[in-house]
Image: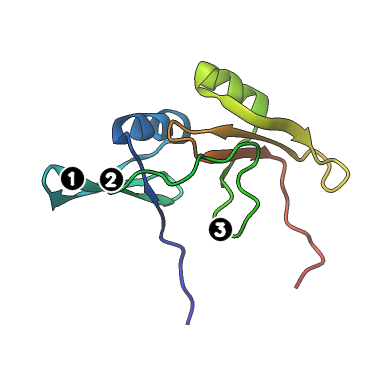
Amino acid sequence: MSATFFHLALTVKDLGKFEDFYAKYFGFRRARVISLGDDAELVFLKNDDNFYFEIFPPEEDRPYPMSEADGPHYAGLRHIAFSVDDIDAKVESMGEDAVITLGPLHFDDVIEGWKTVWLKDPEGNIIEITQGYRDQEDLA
């Protein structure tokens, strides 16, 4: 029995800033809003590739600071990645909202034309923006 990826759940402090950032730069829009009571909402955002974020309001303070560079190196979620045609154009279009934490780095020794940059979203989550990645052909 197969399964289809559905969503990535995140807890965010400022839904407005998070939603504006992902709408403006990655094409996300509201797909569903569910009332949790006491003015709290669970919000589903989706893009044209049917990738969803399930956004929860925080219920407690963050116990440790957010990671830098390409994300945490301990077990868990390291970063979120998006593929674009041109990293330089994407970063330029983002202006001051592109808070780069690492790169851009070139990985031509692995895949000719593969380039990646990491940056922070308004919540401090690390986002990878990559261009030129291709699957390995000799895997079956």
The residue that mark 1 highlights is 40
Picture coordinates of residue 111, whole percent (x, y)? 82, 46
- Residue 54, compared with residue 24, is above or below; it is below
Q: Which residue is drawn at 56% across and 39% down?
A: 127
- Disc 2 and disc 1: Cα gap in Å? 7 Å
Q: Is mark 2 on a helix, strand or loop?
A: loop
Q: Which residue is drawn at 81% across and 41% down?
A: 107
Question: What amino acid is at disc 2?
Answer: Pro
Contact flag, marks 2 and 1 (Cβ < 8 Å): yes
Tag 1 or tag 2, which sits nearer the N-term? 1
Contact flag, marks 2 and 3 (Cβ < 8 Å): no
What number is the disc on residue 127?
none
The colour scheme used to paint the residues is: rainbow
Question: What amino acid is at disc 1?
Answer: Ala
Picture coordinates of residue 97, whole percent (x, y)? 50, 22
Q: Which residue lies furthest to the front in this view?
A: 63
CA neighbours of label 1 inside 10 A, class few (<14), some (14 to 19), many (20+):
few
The residue that mark 2 highlights is 57
The residue that mark 3 highlights is 76
Give 22 or 56, whichever is nearer the viewer: 56
Q: Which residue lies furthest to the right in this view?
A: 109
Q: Is mark 3 on a helix, strand or loop?
A: loop
Tag 1 or tag 3, which sits nearer the N-term? 1
Q: Is mark 1 on a helix, strand or loop?
A: strand
Picture coordinates of residue 99, whole percent (x, y)? 56, 25
Give 61 or 68, whichever is nearer the viewer: 61
Question: What amino acid is at disc 3?
Answer: Gly
Quarter that holds the C terminus: bottom right
Picture coordinates of residue 123, whole percent (x, y)? 43, 35
CA neighbours of label 3 inside 10 A, class few (<14), some (14 to 19), many (20+):
few
Contact flag, marks 3 and 1 (Cβ < 8 Å): no
Q: Residue at x 72, y 41 (%)?
A: 132
